[in-house]
Amino acid sequence: MKTFLRNCALFLVLTVLFIEGITAFLKYSGLFLKYYPGKEIYYAIEKSKLSNDSKILLLGDSVGRQLFDNTINNKQINSLACNQAVGMPGQYFLLNNYLNSENEVDQVIMLFNPLSFQNNLDQIYTYHYFLKPFYNSEYTDLFSENVNRQISKIPYHYFAQVPHIYITSWAPEFRSLDKIDYTFLSPISIEYLIKIKELSSKYSFKLNILPTPVSIESKAFIEAIDKTEFQKCNLDSEFRNYFEKIVYLDSANFEDGIHLTQPERYIEEYKKEILLQSN
Amino acid sequence: MLFNSIDFALFLPIIFLFYWFVTNKSLKLQNFLLVVASYIFYGWWDWRFLSLILFSTVVDYTIGYKLKSEENQLKRQILLWTSIVVNLGFLGFFKYYNFFLDNFISVFSFFGTKLSANALNIILPVGISFYTFQTLSYTIDVYKRKLDPTSDFIAFAAFVSFFPQLVAGPIERATNLLPQFYKKRQFDYNKAVDGMRQILWGLFKKIVIADNCAEHANLIFSNSEDLNGSTLFLGALFFTFQIYGDFSGYSDIAIGVSRLFGFNLKQNFAFPYFSRDIAEFWRRWHISLNTWFRDYLYIPLGGSRGSKWIKVRNTFIIFTVSGFWHGANWTFIIWGILNALFFLPIMLSNNNRKNISIVAQGRTFPGFKDFIGMIVTFLLTVFAWVFFRAENIEQAIEVVSEMVSASFFELPRFVQNRRGAIITIVLVCLFVLIEWNGRESQYAIANSLLKKRRIMRWGYYLIIIFLIFWFRGENQDFIYFQF
């Protein structure tokens, strides 16, 4: 029995070392990204640390990324658009990286579906899309109390950086039990939008928040949004024209009610709008 | 509790350590621990149904005990039938009530009488078909005086609820498993290591082969009306390996876990897809169920003795009942009938025991005749699995019609995840090679590299673990839980 237990323990240690060794190699070499769900976030992080001559920076969710792909180098508009699941903290970290990399920027465009602002890091995707890329020493100092509180509710959050979890799409089952008393801006979104606004004052760039096209089926829901939410938190000027600019399209133009079936049809229009605002 | 869950990964070592270090001084205590562990294992899914197992245990224990002292044949028969009616009554209610109700209403509607009855929202207790047959085997064997009834209630309760094989078999005979609860178990290093090895192989079959194949089979069968013949054939192949990986994987884990506790369960799958005819396939597929049907149904009906008509009748009965055992749906019954049709010509020509030995024993490659036999048998089983997998008879017929149409010769159209499908095909090919290489053992990797140095063996196991980790499919329930 002793030999059996000793050999089991030894084999277990070897297995852990073997699996963690290989996965650590894949993690730090970046090789895991080839077929990784959420790789757009890692591209955005990497790109946010590079110097770029473009004076217009674009942050956005996955619909924003459909319109401005972050893997394409666009000299006029530098896109870091990735995924709504990173929440406003994730967008703030990208912007912060970009500004800390000595990039000069005149205008920051935030291109988001209205529903993206509801993210309070309380989604089933938060583990994979927020914790794995950002729950590390590079970013944890930038976490607010609210963010830390939300993270603490997610099971196994402390394992997010373990290589064999990090490089796979595994995430624990998580359903938030938080009471939601907002219709548009989650508390964490407000907190980090204000931080982004502070950066705009500090670095003197213009901040513009634009809506992506929205399905006509969501119109009633969006019209029911309490517009006083952003007034109360001093984001009135940023969202003043946001709702007026929403383009409602027939639901046939969407794959899943959110993502566009033919994003290329709208790219030029958006480019024009962005460049117009920058002039 | 699922074998491939974190819960079980924690549960097993805890019970193992308690079993060998805390309760090892007393056989009664060890058996009691197994009962408690088994009830926790089952109750993890739904504790309410523990009452069913307990009731079944008490009924069969009492009947067995009474059969011991009862000499009057009529009273013995009444006792036997009480056990059969109680056990099959539960099974019939939980598994078949809605099926019979629906068909009853359909038959009356066909003749113009409209009946209305509400189907009940019945939850099928996991594993009810397995433990019901296991307890029935006890009562029948005691009745036939093949087995002395037990007076040890704890040992009997442990036999009925033994957690490794409680919910999906193998269905153990009382004559094999029950006596093992009477004897003190000694820890055997080689047996435990072999058990661990078999658990590893079972996990590979389930997590890598079955779960990956399931993803593609589900995708193809749920879009069957839009797909061409070759894609549907591919879907049937995926399901063929899904069901084998799933069920034989479960059996491997069950047998392996039992070995850790000092028990020997019977082999449940003996490389069935290398069979050279359907008769051989049925000797190698779900052996514990098929021998159960053979001994308690087929032979009492007369088996293959008697006139041709009797042989044909018995064959149809056993295969139809076997199909119906799998589920309350006509698709399973048709699957059983199809297998009877495949089996009949072999039996009527007295060739059903032609292929008893292991194919290509002692050789690397099979002879031409064996190879053709294997391919034909495999294709027949793939064809029959279509009915087993389909949602209903109409879908099965649509799939089969498309499979035998000209579109079979078109290139397969992947619904999505083409890369994943190709990787799964490569993994299945690797799996078939390993199974072929190990077909003379109890399970494919039983003897692999045994004579090599430890570093080689452990390296081999680490590669399997890595494959499980890296290529694991999306977690699916074990198919046979629903039976």
Image: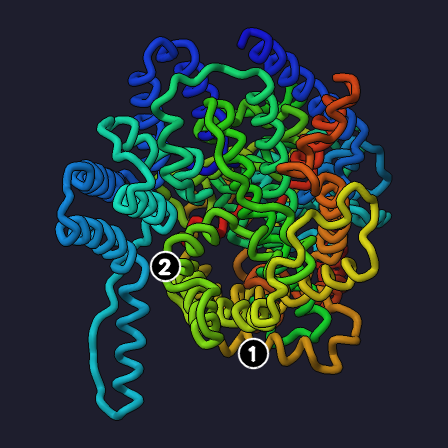
Q: Residue A84, image x and y in percent?
A: 59, 46
Chain under disc 1: B
Scheme of image coloration: rainbow
Residue B289 on image: x %, y %: 45, 51
User: Residue B330: x, y in percent?
Assistant: 43, 71
Kindly indicate the quadrant of the structure image that contains residue A142.
top right
Residue B296 % position (x, y): 37, 54
Q: Nearer the viewer, residue A33 or B312?
A: B312
- Give neighbour class at mark 1: few <14, some 14-19, many 20+ (Cα, 10 Å): some
Count of labels in the image: 2
Q: Residue at x 56, y 39 (%)?
A: A87
Q: Is residue A205 visible?
A: no
Residue at the (66%, 28%) spot, across then down: A164
- The answer to whether residue B113 is visible is yes
Q: Amino acid at mark 2?
A: Pro
Residue ID at (37%, 43%) = A180
In the image, farthest residue toward the bottom: B112
Of callouts 1 and 2, which one flags the residue occurring earlier in the amino acid sequence?
2
Q: Of residues B92 and B316, which is closer to you in this image?
A: B316
> Residue B31 or B234: which is nearer the viewer?
B31
Question: Do the numbered discs 1 and 2 sit on residues whose CB atoms are within 8 Å?
Answer: no
SS for callout 1? helix
Q: To which residue does mark 1 refer?
A: B397
In the rendered structure, the answer to whether residue B220 lies left or right of residue B146 reads right
Q: CA distance from mark 1 to mark 2?
A: 35 Å
The amino acid marked with disc number 1 is Ile
Residue, disc 2? B300
Residue B463 image-quadrant placement: top right
Rendered image quadrant of residue B279: bottom right
